Structure formats: C-alpha cells, structure tokens
Image (cartoon, rainbow, N blue to C red):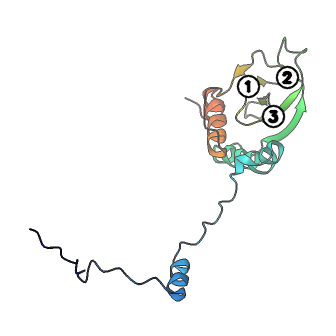
Amino acid sequence: MAEETTPNPTSDQAESPAPNAAEAEDKAAKKPAAKKEKPPALEDKPFADFIQQDFIPALQKGLGEQGIADVELKFEKRPVNVVGMSQAPACWQVIGRWSSGYKQTREFNLYFFNESISGQKGFSYAESGGKASTLESFRIDERKVDLGLLVFWTLQRLNAQKWLVRN
C-alpha cells in the first residue's frame, strides 16, 4: 500500500506574498510614459495652406538652385489655359512664369483638379505668352505624395522640357 504524504513545498514552489501598495505604485511608475503625439505631416494641412505656405516656397527655392531666380509663382483658381479646354471647370493651379535669356517668357501650370495633392493633377506649358497646346497628366499613378516629391517631380518635368538645364 502506498503511503499518503503531505506535500512539503520547497522554497521556489512556495507562494509569494501578495504585493503591498508600495510595490504596486512602483510598478505603475515604471510603465513607459505615454508617447508624444507626432505633429501632423505638412501634407495633412488644408490644401490651400499647404500649397501657399509650403509648396510654393520650396518650389521657389528649388528653381533658384537651378538658376531661375526671377520666377513668379502664383496660386489661383481659374479656367484651364489649354486649347480646347475652355469649357472645363476652373481648378486650382500653381502658375510659374519667368523670362528666359532669349527674350521669351516661359509659363507652366500645375493643375490640381480635386483640390488635393494626392488627387488628379495635370501639367501644361507655354512660351511667349501663348496658350498651352496640350494638357498632360502629372504623376497620377503615385501612391505617396509629399512636399519633397511634389517639388522634385515639378523640377523634373521642367527639366524634361529643357527649361532648366540644356543638353
């Protein structure tokens, strides 16, 4: 017959005493502090504020670094200035204009059809005060749009026109 034995707890199997109030306070104090909220991204600003306060100054700086210091940049809601688009509704545009060294004026328009930097955008250009002949889609397939990319794409498009750097 097997003998019944009473378990004898060893020191590591013994129950630990309930924590007292001071230990509970220490544990609460050791919790990581609440994370500081990140400030909202520039791109989360209202559309018009972002364009006027951030995009236009950054584009002005980028054009200046490319040697175009006398560029006039405006932000307006007006009809699309492209041949055949006179019936299109007015939309917000960033309009850049400057005189080249060849006594020509150069103008580009960056259209924001949805009043959003991530929405549909278009691009047109004209020389010597004429109307633009074509309206091009502008970076419509990009998922991420931020200030740096928007400035880069605009400068890249102007460079493709050979308005910034000659071959």
The image shows residue 84 at horizontal and vertical percentages of 84, 11
Q: Pointer 2: what residue?
A: 80
Q: Is residue 155 left or right of residue 131?
A: left
Q: CA distance from mark 3 to mark 2?
A: 14 Å
Q: Amino acid at mark 1?
A: Gly
Q: Do residues under tags 3 and 2 come within 8 Å of each other at their CB atoms?
A: no
Helix, strand or loop under label 1: strand
The image shows residue 113 at horizontal and vertical percentages of 80, 27
Q: Do residues under tags 1 and 2 come within 8 Å of each other at their CB atoms?
A: yes
Q: Amino acid at mark 3?
A: Glu
The image shows residue 139 at horizontal and vertical percentages of 64, 28
Q: Is residue 81 left or right of residue 17?
A: right
Q: CA distance from mark 1 to mark 2?
A: 10 Å
Q: Pointer 1: what residue?
A: 122
Q: Amino acid at mark 2?
A: Val
Q: Residues within 10 Å of mark 3 (few under 14, many from 20)?
A: some
Nearer to us in this view, 46 or 155: 46
The image shows residue 4 at horizontal and vertical percentages of 17, 73
Residue 115 shows which numbered tag?
3
Quarter occupied by residue 160: top right
Residue at image point 91% right, 14% down: 87
